[in-house]
Every structure is written in structure tokens, then in C-alpha cells.
Image: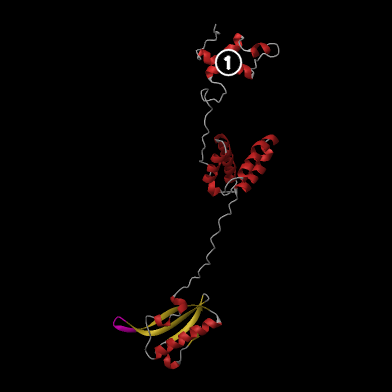
Amino acid sequence: MYSSQSQGEANKGSVQFKATKGCLQIVFSYPAQEGSEIKRKRFYISTGYEDTPIDRQRVGDTVRTLQRDIDYGEVDLSLAKYQPYAALSTVSSIPPISPIPSAKPQPTLSELWERYTEFKQPQVSPSTFCKDYTKQQNHIRRFPSQSLDDAIAIRDYLLSNLTPDAAKRCVSQLKACCDWAVEDGIIEANPFSSMKIKAPKGLTEDEDVSPFSKEERDLIIQMFESGQLCCAEGNATTSTTPVMCASCFSQAHVHQKRLGCNGSTSPRA
């Protein structure tokens, strides 16, 4: 314990500082009014400094200031004057600002498809791999963008450059690829998951593309059956399926006009 007390000052008050749990503390006594009486009271000031040679010197300066005020009867009983800055405020170290982690680089569609095909290749036959996966890779290389963020533009490109059915199959493959990538943690979301392409249904008989109308077809069959076309006899010995030559087609067409497509095959007199 360190003291600045002298014999002449004992009656006025004394100042000391001591180490308590490794920290320096100032202790002094001074007459103070308490009610109607003046009593000597003991005061404690926590300095916030550690018990080191440098900090003891700092606290020593405060002790000398306090002792001077005691001698002149000018002690600040609020003790604010004697509080070292270390005790007045606790300075918290500002933690370093952690840099915001950069977003995981997103693979391109070509890179993603290549990794997906490496995963799928052992699970499918060579013919299926060549037919479906290699063909899809060729489509992907021609996309207007390789970014997953451009899924809508890719869909529009497919609809503009492929048949609806082929575009639908291509989008289905992209969905499967991105689903796999999400499960493996390669990407966060599948931009094709809710994308749908409706391929038109098969053509009806009336919409089917045919070189003959229904009436022409029925008339030709009837003329074959009645032997009115030369091909019917010419192919009788060589094939069970009649084959119509250009001459017979013209003959059937003329005959259709004469009959007015009324279904009758009886020749005119």
C-alpha cells in the first residue's frame, strides 16, 4: 500500500492507493458533514488501472492532486475530479467488421449439365446417353445465355427454335438437372421448376396431312376393289397390297369428278 500522508497532514486527511485483485484503488479519509455533525469518512476510488509500474505512476499523479486538495480543504466530494479516464468509461474494443461473404459463384448451364451427365452416365445405357444427354448438351450450347437467371429467355428461345414437343422435353431435362444440383447444394434454387410447356395433342383424322381427301381415299379403295384401276390387276400376282401409278391416280381423279363424289362407282354407259 502506498501513502502520501505526513504527520502534519494526519489531522486533515490521508491518501493511499493499493492493489486489489490486480487493480489499483485510491483510498483516503476526509472530514465530511453528516447531518449536524462533521465526521471523518473513508472514500474509495476505483482507478481502472492495473498494478503495473506505468499505471502506479499514473495513479500517483492523482494521489498527489487529491492530497493537495485535502491540504487546502478543496476536496471534490463527488470524486469526479479524481476519477481517471480509465474508470470514467469502459472502452470496448470495436470488433473488426467481418467482410460480407461473397455469393457462391453460380455455374453456367453448360458446366451444370456436364456435371449432371457425369452423374447420370453410369446409370443409363450408352444409347440412351447418346440419344438424350448428348443431344441436350448440343441444345444448351446454342442457348442465347448460359446463366440460370435467364431461364425465361431460354424457354422462349426453345419455343422459337424447336417444335413444342422438343422444347417440352428440353425443359424437362433442364428441370431434372437443376433439381439434382439443388439436392447436391451446387445451386440454391431451380429456375425451371415451375416452367411448363404444353405440346399440342395429336392431330385428328380431319386435321391429318394426307395427299387425298377422305372422299378421294374412299373412292380409290372402291375402284381398286371393283377392278376399275389397271394397277389393281397388274399387282394382283405380285403383291397383296395394290399400288397405284400416276396414270391410275389421274383416272381416279377424273372418275371422281364425273361421279360428283356421290359414292357410286358404276361406270357411265
**To which quarter of the image does residue 165 belong?**
top right
Element at label 1: helix
Q: Nearer the viewer, residue 210 or 105?
A: 210
**To which quarter of the image does residue 13 belong?**
bottom left
* Residue annotated with mark 1: 252
Q: Residues within 10 Å of mark 1 (few under 14, many from 20)?
A: many
Asked if residue 36 is among those painted magenta in the image, a careful observer would answer yes
In the image, the segment drawn in magenta is 34-38
234 relative to 73, above or below: above
**Residue name at image x 33 percent, y 84 percent:** 38
**Residue name at image x 57 percent, y 12 percent:** 222
| Residue furthest front in the image | 269
Q: Look at the image and tell me whether residue 188 can be seen.
A: no
Q: Look at the image and tell me whether residue 114 can be seen.
A: yes
Q: Nearer the viewer, residue 160 or 74?
A: 160
Q: Position of residue 181 (x, y in %)?
A: 59, 45
Q: Position of residue 249 (x, y in %)?
A: 60, 18
| Residue furthest bottom in the image | 8
Q: Amino acid at mark 1?
A: Ala
Tell me, what colour scheme is on the image? secondary structure
**To which quarter of the image does residue 14 belong?**
bottom left
43 relative to 261, above or below: below
47 relative to 150, above or below: below
Magenta-colored segment: predominant secondary structure: strand
**Residue name at image x 59 percent, y 12 percent:** 223
Asked if residue 227 is among those painted magenta in the image, a careful observer would answer no
Q: Position of residue 52 (x, y in %)?
A: 55, 80
User: Quarter holding the C terminus?
Assistant: top right
Q: Position of residue 1 (x, y in %)?
A: 51, 83
**Residue name at image x 53 percent, y 19 percent:** 214
